[in-house]
Amino acid sequence: MKITQVELYEVEIPPIPVIARYLPKIYDITLCRVQTDEGLEGWGEFLSKKSAGQEQADALLGQDPLALDPYNRPDAFTCALLDIAGQAYGIPLHRFFGAQVRDKVPVSYWSCPMTPEETAAEAEIGAGLGFSNHKLKARSWNIVETVRLMKEAAGADYTVGVDPNTEFGLLPKAARLASELEPFGTVSVFEDPLLKNNLEWYRILREKTHIPIALHLGAPSGVLAALKAECIDYVNLGGSALQVRKAAALAEAADVPCWIQMGGLCTGVLAAYSVHLQATLPNATLPCDELPFTREADVVAEGLALEKGHFAVPTGSGLGIKVDMEVVERYRVA
């Protein structure tokens, strides 16, 4: 088998209207399609412009995809090569990562910073769709009012993941906000509430609140440092599939649950890849941040089903998805 063509499609798919009012464009997305002379094709996705992957794409031409080490490539091409290998061997992609431990992966609903009233309206929509957790890009000046209105709109069983991207800043403000939010009983996690240059602050905050504390980390070394500092209850993991596996294993050894964000506001291609990986991680029990439904359209037409706040792990060979080329071309910019 030989690789005969590698195509890169840079696409711009606008967010849904309520998000687009604040974030008309989120970040660059490029899809890669690797085709073979035996009619198999593999898909991957990276979060940057097309030019960032052109050299790697060109290097694949003429190669036997089954003879290559897929893990020695940028992760979008790792995904595409594993997609081809899975189809060739008739197995789902998650088999390349380990034993499957779940057939459904929980996912959060998501909002960018909005007014409290707008966020509460979105919470009502999320609850109506069957989501049980809402990941919220929080801001210190309105987070307490926002959570109060969200609870009124969506009910006490609808939980809120508070992620200020370190905007709470220093320990006194974060501790005060935690004490004001605790009584609602709906905040499921504080993610990156403080500046991240002092893990001791996170350890102290963890002692001051019943709200679980999490850091968004990538490199396994960062996870190890946080575990040694005893400053987290949960961890949000990103990066390549192999990096996530290594970091998740460290967290599992310390009995720390995790959730995964390999793509975030990505398309269904990267979301499907992440779901396959999460299907093999025993401690990836928390709702993930793979969010193709935040855009007005998705390039995946079949294979990645979302129901009641869970992705069903694709069961077909390889990624197990079908890409809609009409959607790709409609939103293609390069």
Image (cartoon, rainbow, N blue to C red):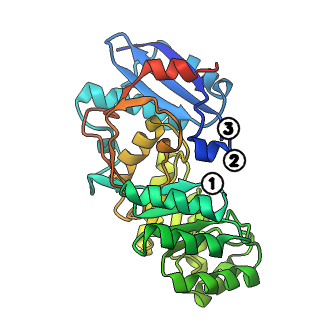
User: Splitting the image into 4 quarters, where does residue 273 fall?
Assistant: top left
In the visual, does 95 lie left or right of 328? left
In the visual, does 258 lie left or right of 197? left
Looking at the image, tell me whether mark 3 or mark 1 is earlier in sequence order: 3
Kindly give the residue lying farthest to the left in the view shown: 90
Q: Where does label 3 land, which residue?
A: 25
Q: Residue at x 40, y 18 (%)?
A: 64
Q: Position of residue 94 (x, y in %)?
A: 32, 44
Packing grade of label 1 (10 A; few <14, some 14-19, many >=20) is: some
Give the amino acid type for the residue marked by disc 2 in the picture.
Answer: Tyr
The secondary structure type at the circle numbered 1 is loop
Choose mark 3 or mark 2, whichever is in front: 2
Q: Nearer the viewer, residue 101 or 119?
A: 119
The secondary structure type at the circle numbered 3 is loop
Q: Position of residue 184 (x, y in %)?
A: 52, 81
Q: Nearer the viewer, residue 156 or 33?
A: 156
Q: Where does label 2 land, which residue?
A: 22
Q: Position of residue 85 (x, y in %)?
A: 33, 29
> In the picture, which quadrant includes the N terminus?
top left
Looking at the image, tell me whether mark 1 or mark 2 is earlier in sequence order: 2
Give the amino acid type for the residue marked by disc 1 in the picture.
Answer: Cys
Packing grade of label 2 (10 A; few <14, some 14-19, many >=20) is: few
Q: Where does label 1 land, which residue?
A: 112
